Amino acid sequence: MTDRKPKNIFVAGPIAPAFIGESIGHHASKTNIGGHSIFLGQVRADMINDQPVKAIEYSTYEAMALEKMHEIREAIFSKYALTCMHVYHSLGRVGAGEISLFVFTSSAHRKAAMDACAETVERIKSELPVWGKELFDNESYQWKENK
Amino acid sequence: MKVNIILFGQLTDITGADTVTLENILDTDNLVSTLHKSYPAFIHSKYVIAVDKKVISENTPLLNNCTVALLPPFSGG
């Protein structure tokens, strides 16, 4: 077992671009890192019944989501030679064009970071109990489906 | 036994609430059939059942104070 403990990944509202920049900056002292891989999920203004999606409101089963994310993190660390991994997911309202998911992996050589990032994103999408409610201008909504 | 169920996503549209309490429930099969009688819209809803945060795939006995959650398809990210 490792000493990694379940971390909170949820942030209220959109993930600020400045926060992403600062997160990159925090790794300057970790000089064993040779490559970072970053995935950013952005809310898309899909047209549904001639109405654009204005925002997505995210909700979660937090206790289960944090346990599941811990399990995913442990599995990814045992599969890839990562130096570190950071995951942030929005809860509440995120407007079209704003960032709702930030996955950031780092390793000595690029391949581990890139593969780990891609696999983590896929596992988050399919395994984390999070739901998106797509909101329209006229107060109507529909529940998002992941493709 | 009394069971408290927590609901998420589109399932909360059916009940109008994010928790539902059902009486005289012994196991998850029993829970599903009772739910279908109270809220027929659940018959056509897609969801998995988690007992104490673990998704179950077969009939599971419910103990006092356990937490049952009904989870519609995930759509995070």
Image (cartoon, grey):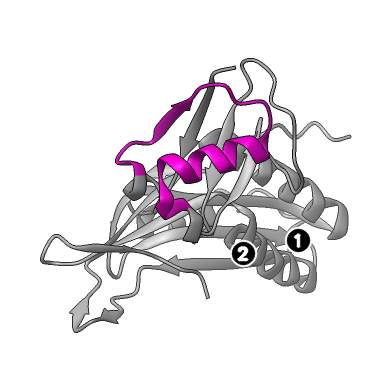
Which chain contains the residue that carries disc 2?
A
In this figure, which residue is indicated by the disc labeled 2?
A: A121
Q: Residue at x 42, y 51 (%)?
A: B40
For residue B9, say whether it is visible.
no
Taking depth in this image into account, of A79 and B10 the one nearest to the observer is B10
Q: Position of residue A95 (x, y in %)?
A: 26, 62
Highlighted range, magenta: B15-42
Q: Earlier in the sequence, mark 1 or mark 2?
A: 1
Residue B3 appears in the rendering: yes
Q: Is residue A78 left or right of residue A41?
A: right
Which residue type carries mark 1? Ser
Q: How many badges with numbers are in the image?
A: 2
**On screen, residue B57 above or below A79:** above
Label 1, on which residue?
A107
Residue type (three-letter) at the residue carrying disc 2: Val
Q: Residue at x 25, y 62 (%)?
A: A141
Percent x, y for residue A93? 28, 52
Instruction: Identify the secondary structure beneath mark 2.
Output: helix
- Would you say the residues marked 1 and 2 are in contact, meaning their CB atoms lie under 8 Å apart? no
Q: CA distance from mark 1 to mark 2?
A: 17 Å
At which x and y percent is residue A22?
Answer: 45, 52
**Chain containing the residue with disc 1:** A
Left/right of residue B48 with respect to residue B40 in the rendered view: right
